[in-house]
Image (cartoon, rainbow, N blue to C red):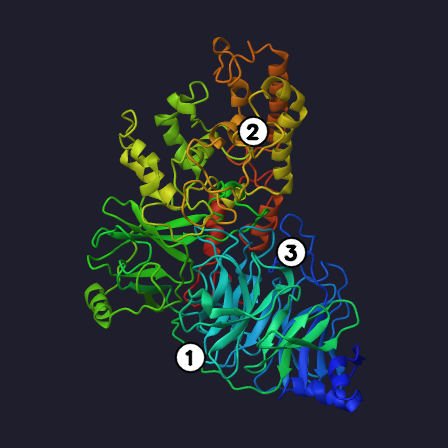
Amino acid sequence: MNVLRGWLLLAVVAMGLGGDAASAEEGRHSLVPGVDQVLFAVRQTYEDSHWYANIGYFCDDHHQKAYSGNGGPSEGRLMKLDLRTGQAAVLLDAEGGSIRDPQVHYDGKKAIFSYLKAGTDYYHLYEIRLDGSGLRQLTDGPYDDYEPAYLPDGGIVFVSTRCRSWVACWMTQVGVLYRCDADGGDIRRLSFNTAHDNTPWMLPDGRILYTRWEYVDRSQVEFHHLWTMNPDGTNQQPFYGNMHPGIVMIAAKPIPGSDEILATFSPGHGINDHRGFATIVSAKAGPDERRSARQLHGRPALIKDPYPVSQDVFLVAHGKELRRMDRSGNMQTLYTWDGDGQVYEPRAIRSRPVETVIPPRVRPQETTGQLFLADIYRSRELEGVARGEIKRLLVLEDLPKPVNFSGGPDLVSWLGQFTLNRVLGTVPVEEDGSAFFEIPAGRPIFFVALDENDLSVKRMHSFTTVMPGEVTGCVGCHEPRTNTPELGSLADVFRRNRPPHRIEPFDGFPDVLDFTRDIQPILDQHCVACHGPERREAGVLLSGDLGPVWSHSYFSLLAHLQVADGRNGLGNYPPRTIGSSASPLLEKLSGGHHEVVASPEQWRTVWLWIESGAPFAGSYAGLRNAVDQGVAGRATGRVFGENHGLLQERCGDCHALRDPQNEQGRALPFRPLVARAQRGVSREVGIHERVVIPDDPLTQFSEHILLNFSRPEKSSLLLAPLAAEAGGYESCGAIFADTNDPAYQRLLASLSQGQAELDAQPRYGAEGFVPNHQYIRELIRFGILPPSFDPSSQPLDVFRADQDYWRSLWLQPSGHDGHDGQF
């Protein structure tokens, strides 16, 4: 066996015991009682700053790798430290590849880990005996399998990109929980999250403890906390977190002999390599009690991968060092790696008890599960809602992305939702607040409580999933998790509502809404005559002309607070403050605005659009790659950059041109900070929440309303300073007497050049749009399009392509997904 000698450690211990080698070894060994050897990995870090972006490739460029070493030769080793001698032995040298996530088997004689071989692009699961023999590969295929843990029933739980989706707010792939048999066979999906799961580990009671990141109708950077599920995927529940924002809670493990867990709390939206603060958590007081978490240490010692040996002794990694930590956060170095790369994932090599085996509850031949709700009125943030007001639940599905290219929602929304939502239909709520109904298994489902007029009362701001044949439920809506339903109410639910209600769909309406296809024609019929660029009544533009990113109508409806979406906030809003009940547009279409009355079908279409998150692009084909984003950015930059001196001369007396955040100075263009100070709102605001204030300068001075790249001559930037008699608004005065003014012509030329560049590759929402090559590449990879597909010569219905992609992920009666789960 290849043996490496790290820097001889524990000098403090050696000195304290007289300095002789035997005493040093005894001191080192005594620091971790009951443990003779420690398994750990050595590897290089990765470049991306996110905690999860360490597998696969980046969407925009599949040659740019995200994993350890970022595509170049890496420094990967699986190692074993003998605490008695201080010697570290190499169990496996990856020879330019990468090794991560080891876990020791219950018998203490073998370990499972994730291994990316040199010259390949995917991590797969491997197993090895702890004497260095018996290496065997368990999984394969063009997907990453990582962060494995042994299950008490003999299987293995792990994280995998077999879910075939991309992070909704970044450029890397999603990994969620799967399980397989001990030999790597019978791979089955356990989690149907559209964002990441991470670091599964067993609790003594047989549940899987893991990190779940989610952001349904709320901020993408706030909720990545601890959840549990059974080894068959049933009973998915929050363990700690998911109510209060902040912190990535990751790498959690039970502390032996206690009901506490030890985890890394990585600050904010998390730090790469899972670095953060070792934190002890007790869930006795429920998942929402902030005082139940105790951080053990402070900066600068950000640690990785804490492993509880006992109630008082923990192993942690810190840079190149393997350390021992106690409950007070005191640390001593046990070993220092003196090569390239860093130390990761220390694990005690010893036998350990097998956790409780929870019998499986899944019925693989079924495609649905059942949900019961005991009493929707037993809820937080439901003040002012009388018992009996809620009549139905709207059932929606969060939809995964086959590509993504940015940290924002891009064309899906204006800093609202990051994913599209499918409207499945409604189910009834009884007078006592109970409900009992079927939902499709293996899909991320969430709900909106509706009143008798189908207006929203309360949204879920999270999602739930049932496995095939599972029956599960909840007490109320956002109820404290320490509550339990009354036995009588549960009995009444089952007695009265059997069989469960089936979802009643909205026949004849699209289940995924697109603004240009579904909403703009309604605005064209009822609104544009007064709110087009020719009249612009009340300063509101509702024409479908495209600005730099979205249409004027889409941006205007949100900027003028006519539609209340999730706005990327913190969720759990008070009743009737999000969705249809808080969207004045619906009232305006019902006779409340100059006798405008939409047809029932039109009203329902707008209602469906609002309740499904008010998206702009109703297809993920609309997501823009770096080239597309660059063209739009340059078009905008040209108008304001090339003409800065002109604008300063003609507009500078009234408009701040060098300070885009200056609201009082009416900045031109006005670009408020994302984390804008709230005004008159006594609530906590999300880090990236879209804050729009009454009479917001956004409605007049944002580039998204100033610039018209469909009809440049209709740009407000030109019409506002143009004399009325020349066809302008003259809202800035007659800065331009007519369209022959040289300054007017210079601005028009810049706008027209931007239009030409944008039209060279027609954008989403414009005639002739063709999806980018990355979208085509991934649909081919996922088996949705044939390898020979050529978008330049073959037409593609992007709405149909998206639907085919989503359906390919549905569970089949076998319990596998449309690709049979095994790959």
Residue placed under numbered mark 3 in the picture: 49
- Measure the C-alpha gap from mark 1 to mark 3: 38 Å
| Dot in front, 1 or 3 | 3
Residue placed under numbered mark 2 in the picture: 667
Q: What is the secondary structure assignment of the residue under circle 1?
A: loop
- Residue 313, label in figure: none
Residue 5 location in percent, x, y? 80, 80
Crowding near the residue tagged with mark 2, few <14, some 14–19, many ≥20 C-alpha atoms within 10 Å: many
Q: Mark 2 is on which residue type?
A: Ala
Q: Is 527 placed left or right of 219 in the picture?
A: left
Q: Mark 1 is on which residue type?
A: Ile
User: Can residue 555 be seen from the camera position used here?
Assistant: yes
At x 35%, y 45%, the residue is 577
Q: Mark 3 is on which residue type?
A: Ser
- Measure the C-alpha gap from mark 2 to mark 3: 33 Å
Residue placed under numbered mark 1 in the picture: 358
Q: Are marks 1 and 3 in contact (CB under 8 Å)?
A: no
Q: Earlier in the sequence, mark 1 or mark 2?
A: 1
